[in-house]
Amino acid sequence: MVFKPSSYENEGNWKKGSLSEEKFRTFMNEIGVGAVKTSARVDKFDHVDFIVGENTPVDLKGDKNTDAVWLEIKNVWGGKGSLFGKAKYMVIEYLDINTYVFYDRLELVKYIKRFKDVCKHKSDYHCLYTREGNKDQIVKVKEINIRPYEKHRFQYNI
């Protein structure tokens, strides 16, 4: 039997992801920065969702809130997570403050390497967590925890 992560069975996640990507692309183009969607292969293997501006690779994490940011060490298949991709910036969309924040991906990698304990509860912060039915390894933080790694912030209107 072939392993299939439970996250891939949720069509709602796919739809939300597509909507977040289109919203980001549209916004970046409207403000004159520009954003071009990468191929499915680049997205999956390099963890680069868009080329922004002249030639800046970014990985978008849309539909998040400032009190719960999941940073991915391993993906749902057990492979390298988005933090270990080829993006220059990890872009997180915070719905509760209508903002896209660009973080230096390599600085986030250094930050999360300090967390070694396994979470006891889903509500725990700053520990390693794996979601049931997946092979991922993620660390939950708050926006304020990763603010020192922020490089750009763009607020949008609804």
Image (cartoon, helix red, strand yellow):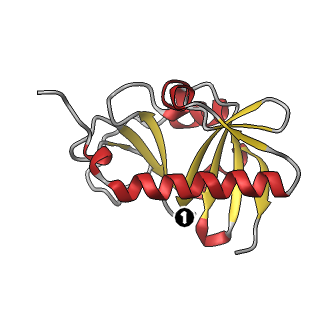
Location of the C terminus by quadrant is bottom right
Observer-nearest of 34 and 134: 34
- 34 to the left or right of 89: right
Report which residue position mark 1 lands on.
65
Label 1: few (<14), some or many (≥20) within 10 Å? some
Q: Residue furthest left?
A: 1
Q: Residue furthest bottom?
A: 158
- Give residue 45's position: percent from left, percent from top: 49, 24
Observer-nearest of 155 and 126: 155
Can residue 144 be seen in this snapshot?
no
Which residue is rendered at x = 27% and y = 48% of the image?
Answer: 9
- Give residue 101's position: percent from left, percent from top: 70, 53
Observer-nearest of 144 and 136: 136
- 19 to the left or right of 116: right
Snapshot quadrant of residue 128? top left
- Give residue 4's position: percent from left, percent from top: 23, 36
Which residue is rendered at x = 36% and y = 37% of the image?
Answer: 137
- 142 to the left or right of 74: right
- Give residue 8's position: percent from left, percent from top: 31, 44
Observer-nearest of 18 and 60: 18
Amino acid type indicated by mark 1: Asn
Which residue is rendered at x = 20% and y = 31% of the image?
Answer: 3
Location of the N terminus by quadrant is top left
**Of helix, strand and loop, which one carries label 1?**
loop
